[in-house]
Image: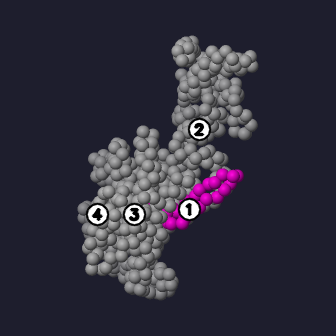
Amino acid sequence: MIILPEVFYADKQRLRDSISYEKSPKGIITVIKLDDGCCCVLSRYEDEEWVLPNHWFPESTRDSHKVIKFERIIDGNLKGVAKVIVARQLWGEDSVSRKKRGNTYLYDFKSLVCFLNWLSSRNINHTSKITPIITQQYVYYVKALKACSGKRKGMSLSSNSQNHKLNAVEACWRCLRGTVYSFEHPWPESSAAAIIGHNPNSKEAQTLTIPDSILAPLTQYAQEKLKEAHKLIELQNAISKLVLREEYKSNHNKYKSKCLNLLGWEGNLIEFNKAIFELRDCCFLLILLTTGMRSHELLNIKRDKWYSEVKDGERFYFIGSRSDKTHEGNTHWLCPELAIESVKILEQLSAPLQLKLTKELYQALDDDHVEYMRLNNISGCLAISECKNKKNKIIVISNSALIKTLQARVDSCGLEWHLTPHQFRRTFANYVVHHKLGDLRYLRDHFKHWSLDMSALYAMNKQQDLDLYDDIYAAFDDVRQGIIGHWLEPDTPLSGGLAKNIRNLRGKNEDVRTFKSRKNMIKNISEHIFLRATSLAWCTNDDGSCGGGQCEECEHGVIDDKKQGWWEAVYAQQIELRLIEDIGESGNQTVERAILRCEKVLADLGADVENIKRKVVANARRT
């Protein structure tokens, strides 16, 4: 049904006024706006299901996950209450709902269903009967619930899940004020979070970092697959150009197989399609790893949304997409050329489906406005696919499908690891931090950019994913606290110009300042210490005046036992140089000074210098 916008707004105002006193109000609840400014009605208030607009969700969300189903509420009276609550949340009349996205409404509705069905099981069919005693009983019920799936299966719900279920009670109280369904505050002078003991700043189950033993073979596998891209895309283009008569559509696969064999493909059509999907998945994997994108941001990438620019003689690459989580809208990510190569491959792989989508888009223009808007939103997306369960309808692959397909790549490498897309974001932040702290790993051409000053990266592009910078800083802060906490351990051997001050700090008997805990003390101290790696030491100089070298004497230098391996290697090199007879007097003097430096540091760190010397000399003489 197509209506003018003024008709919708008038009906919406009438409905808002009537739901507080009418028993069975009627009216339009959700619409989508068409390109000509008119509105297409999606749902009416009296419907059992309310369809939410597509643009409230990532393109990858399935249609079935965009519907609020009131049939899930057992009691008819409470179903009417639920409609009042959800309608007011959709209209922004709930003070905490103004910036919610579609998935958040559905998640909130799930908790609302739990509470209202619990009331029904207690023979309470009207919310005006809710008292603090009733809500306290619901608290006991929520605390006794067990998780049905995931890592906590069979265990009590996490404090975050418990808090969310109790927030549904508070949402009821807020949204029903001023109506015949109102009730007194569920827990006077308290809150859901306080009752559960929930700390929103704590991370109960932190996302894992992908270990090098998994990431290295997985990355190498993906890069090897990219080498096959040119051949596979040529074959795909060839078979997509086959023009068959309508009556022979059932023989498409037969002709495609024949064409592939003529073009030199040794396998069958099933194996070819599998190779295409593997190539696509490897592109997804490399983009996630090299940008720090979230999964929905990856699935939102559209063709021709990447670019590069030269700054100070060096080329920087950026991928554009849309971020729905932070409400930033169009955003860009700094990336290496490898990520751009992956995007270009995805553009070519998705080209045949994009042609089909364009054809269906024009067909829907005249008679199916909802389908036209859906196709128009996903047009140009690189992660499109045909849904076999919906007559080959073109969709953006879902987040759950992305998880399965990435896990399939892990399994195909024979690796034992439960992979999730968000692990790539945390791993990316972790790699950036370790590169900045002197640990050179994979994709060096990319991470060297992240060793620049953050303000310089901000200045390059105002539309970058600024939330990613927060994640990187959080990872850096964790690592920094770990390093400084290690320094403050009473038995950690230290060397360097700053070592004496650190030993004095940890050796004081009196408390200079009171901290809640040792962890809190380390956090407070680390916030005031600049930290970077110089391979042989840790540098705390923050004014840019450090010229490098002589870290063991510099007042800003700290050397702990984790750097001992570096010093042993340097010491071994100098001993070997000492055995060379033709390096000249100045060379001998330089070597002797370096040996003394190494011996002092290694002695400070508790190493057996004489034993190291004997081993090096013995090895040198054998060679």
Query: Which residue position holds label 2?
Result: 437
x then y, percent, for residue 21: 39, 79
Measure how far apart labels 4 and 3 are at the Cα level: 56 Å
Residue behind mark 3: 235
- Secondary structure, mark 3, is helix
CB under 8 Å between discs 4 and 3: no
Residue 250 percent coordinates (x, y): 26, 73
Q: Could you tell me how far apart the alpha carbons at marks 2 and 3 are, in whole angstroms?
A: 45 Å
> Is 367 one of the magenta-colored residues?
no
Quadrant (top left, top right, bottom left, bottom right) of the N terminus = bottom left
Quarter location, residue 488: top right
Give whichever of discs 1 and 4 has the lower sequence position.
4
Q: Amino acid at mark 3?
A: Leu
For the record, the magenta segment spans: 296-325
Q: Nearer the viewer, mark 2 or mark 4?
A: 2
Foreground: disc 2 or disc 3: 3
Mark 1 Cα within 10 Å, few/some/many (few <14, many 20+)? Answer: some
Looking at the image, do the residues carrying marks 1 and 4 touch, with CB atoms under 8 Å apart? no
Q: Earlier in the sequence, mark 2 or mark 3?
A: 3
The residue that disc 4 covers is: 117
